Image: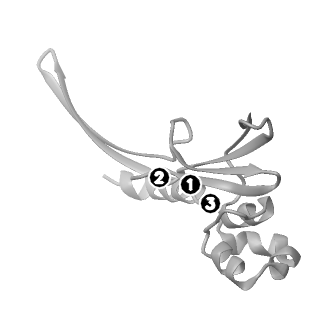
Amino acid sequence: MKLFPRCLPVCAALILLTGCSTPADRIPQHQAAFDAWPADIRENVKAGHVAVGYMPEMVQVALGEPDRVFTTTATQGAPVEVWVYLDHSPSWSIGVGVGGSNGSSAIGTSVGVSNQNWGPNEKMRVVFEAGRVVAIEQRRK
């Protein structure tokens, strides 16, 4: 059966659609600001890392656009902005099924891929106060 060669382009397209941009892709869009940052910050941003004290543009270049943004009010009443990043890595599943009815039987298999945009899959929260990162929360695996 020649089903596998027919589905190969569809599978390849699905894998490409789950890809994401990298810091190297985002740096040229913020080149002037990037060049003005201290060398240690530039290296962290290139590696996709952020730290307390970073400004929003530094975080955006390192991690990309957040998936969610919300604000909350801290104890002192100052607004705090929280950027939430989700885990967009593909997850794979394989299923096998067997069924039968009236003397006949069937066997089926499937392979699925999902980027899990629908679930509670937060991987990181970056908390800003007065335009600077004041906390970074990461999910333990």
* Residue that appears at 80% across and 40% down: 78
Residue identifier under label 1: 18
Chain-order first, disc 2 or disc 1: 1
Residue at label 2?
A: 90
Q: Give the residue drawn at x 49%, y 54%.
A: 89
Relative depth, front residue between 38 and 17: 38
How far apart, in angstroms, are the residues tagged by discs 2 and 3? 11 Å
| SS type, badge 2 | loop
Nearest the viewer among 131 and 4 is 131
Q: Which residue is mark 3?
A: 20
Identified at 41% across, 59% down, the residue is 5
Left or right of 97, for residue 47: right
Residue type, mark 3 in image: Cys
Q: Is residue 129 above or below residue 101?
A: below
Residues under numbered marks 2 and 3 in contact, where contact means CB atoms less than 8 Å apart:
no
Where residue 51 is drawn, which disc sits there? none
Under mark 2, the amino acid is Pro
Picture residue at 60% right of the left edge, 75% below the top: 47
- Label 1 sits on what residue type? Thr
Secondary element at tag 1: loop
The picture quadrant where one finds residue 39 is bottom right
